[in-house]
């Protein structure tokens, strides 16, 4: 897989960008990493809050669905623009919270999708962990659609 700058495919920017690297992606799965810094939004007393974990999961999950709108060789995200929404948080369980300096790994798996040429409605399951510690597991629904320039 070529190096893909996730910022080319997400509308988020600091301080709301909660994915640093897209480690792996396929049509049904994605793995991302994010290192918690002291200046990361949603860090309080050295701990990354629940809302930050959920947003990290959502950004990671959207990579699976959003990639379907991009041409295969468009690694810079120049020819297509999409926007996505969390349409429902079906289930989220938070088991622990990461601390500043820790790197979290998010794994997302597509459960189902209904896609037209203009939009996709999808359900994605995900886990967020730090080393061997499960931090979050959940199922989210998304709507992603292409934006006409």
Image: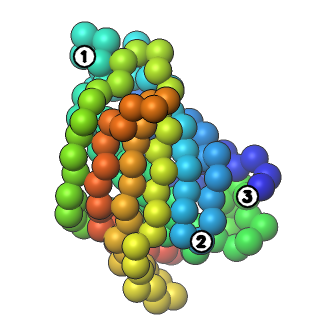
Relative side of 121 to 130, left or right = left
The one nearer the camera, 100 or 116, is 100
Query: Which residue shows up at 45% across the image and 32% down it?
Result: 132
Relative side of 97 to 61, left or right = left
Q: Secondary structure at mark 3?
A: loop
How crowded pointer 3 is (Cα within 10 Å; few <14, some 14-19, many 20+) is rated as: some
The numbered dot on residue 44 is 1
Percent across and percent down for residue 109 are: 46, 63
Q: Is residue 6 above or below residue 39?
A: below
The numbered dot on residue 75 is 3
Which sits earlier in the primary sequence, circle 2 or circle 3? 2
Percent across and percent down for residue 137 are: 31, 49
Query: Where, by quadrant of the figure, is residue 120 drawn?
Result: bottom left
Which mark is in front, 3 or 1?
Answer: 1
Task: Measure the C-alpha gap from mark 2 to mark 3.
Answer: 15 Å
Residue contact at pointers 2 and 1, CB within 8 angstroms: no
Task: Measure the C-alpha gap from mark 3 to mark 1.
Answer: 35 Å
Q: Is residue 8 above or below residue 14?
A: below
Query: Which residue shows up at 54% across the image and 37% down it?
Result: 33
Percent across and percent down for residue 147 are: 47, 71
Which sits earlier in the primary sequence, circle 2 or circle 1? 2
Q: Is residue 3 above or below residue 74?
A: above
Task: Measure the C-alpha gap from mark 2 to mark 1.
Answer: 36 Å
């Amino acid at each position: 897989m070529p190096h893909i700058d996730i910022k080319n495919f997400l509308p988020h920017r600091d301080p709301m960008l909660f994915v640093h690297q897209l480690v792996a992606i396929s049509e049904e799965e994605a793995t991302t990493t994010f290192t918690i810094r002291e200046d990361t939004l949603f860090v309080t007393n050295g701990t990354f809050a629940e809302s930050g974990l959920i947003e990290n999961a959502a950004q990671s999950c959207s990579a699976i669905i959003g990639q379907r709108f991009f041409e295969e060789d468009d690694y810079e995200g120049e020819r297509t623009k999409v926007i996505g929404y969390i349409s429902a948080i079906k289930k989220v369980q938070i088991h622990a919270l990461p601390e500043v300096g820790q790197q979290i790994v998010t794994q997302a798996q597509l459960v189902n999708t209904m896609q037209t040429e203009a939009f996709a409605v999808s359900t994605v399951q995900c886990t967020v962990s730090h080393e061997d510690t499960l931090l979050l597991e959940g199922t989210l629904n998304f709507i992603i659609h292409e934006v006409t320039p």
